[in-house]
Image (cartoon, helix red, strand yellow):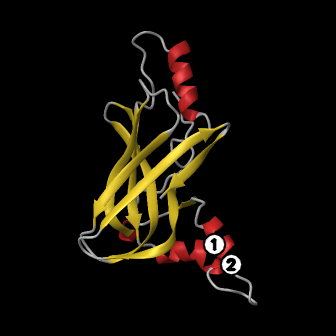
Amino acid sequence: ISDLRGVLPPFRHHIGSIADARARLLAPGGQLIPRRDIMWAAVTAAPEIYGCCAEPWGESTYGVSMDGARRIVTNIWSRRRIGPGQILLPPQVWATLEYSSVTEPDIGAEIAWTVDRPGTADGLVVWFDATLAHGIHFSNAPGEPELIYGNAYFPWSRPVPLETGDEVTVSLHADLVRNDYIWRWD
């Protein structure tokens, strides 16, 4: 039994610890709890959350360009609470961790959407649905009761106006480097 996650399952040595415990300590026929985490990603239209991250760095102050600082703050994900009304493009599965077999700590995939309603996209929200055992689940999805985990918000460099029929493709990666994950989204 373990809960070594942070806001998301890719957290420090969570995956490696599960794989090691499974190999060394799990008796034949034994069960891991949790069994699985499914991670979801959706495109957001959350201007107030985006504004908290990026707006202070948007304009030149006293003739000093803040572009360098803006690039930094829009390349750092944060724990936020995203509401269902702030999701512009519907959730898609980003990754599934089957704890009975997972060994690789690095996670990455490309996700694509076709825009079905216009809006201004500003980032991604990522969350997970956990299956602890048969019939026992919980989720930190937008709209679900608030849990300790929150949601992971990945801001974009700049908000992007989208029209119906546009294609959006996002590459999202979490790579374990020493003791923590390096996140990349493009």
C-alpha gap between disc 1 and disc 2: 6 Å
Give neighbour class at mark 1: few <14, some 14-19, many 20+ (Cα, 10 Å). Answer: some
At label 2, the amino acid type is Met
Residue 88, compared with residue 109, is above or below; it is below
Total count of labels: 2
Residue 72, compared with residue 141, is above or below; it is below
Please name whichever residue, 138 or 68, is drawn nearer the observer in this view of the structure.
68
Residue 26, compared with residue 116, is above or below; it is above
Q: Position of residue 117 (x, y in %)?
A: 26, 74
Residue 1, compared with residue 72, is above or below; it is above
Helix, strand or loop at mark 1: helix
Helix, strand or loop at mark 2: loop
Apparent side of residue 105 relative to residue 97 in the rendered image (left or right): right
Q: Position of residue 120 (x, y in %)?
A: 39, 77
- List the residue tagged with mark 1: 70
Q: Position of residue 29 (x, y in %)?
A: 39, 12
**Residue 143 can be seen, yes or no:** no
Give the residue at x 47% y 11%.
27
At label 1, the amino acid type is Arg
- List the residue tagged with mark 2: 66
Give the residue at x 51% y 61%.
153
Q: Position of residue 53 (x, y in %)?
A: 60, 71
Apparent side of residue 84 relative to residue 20 in the rendered image (left or right): left
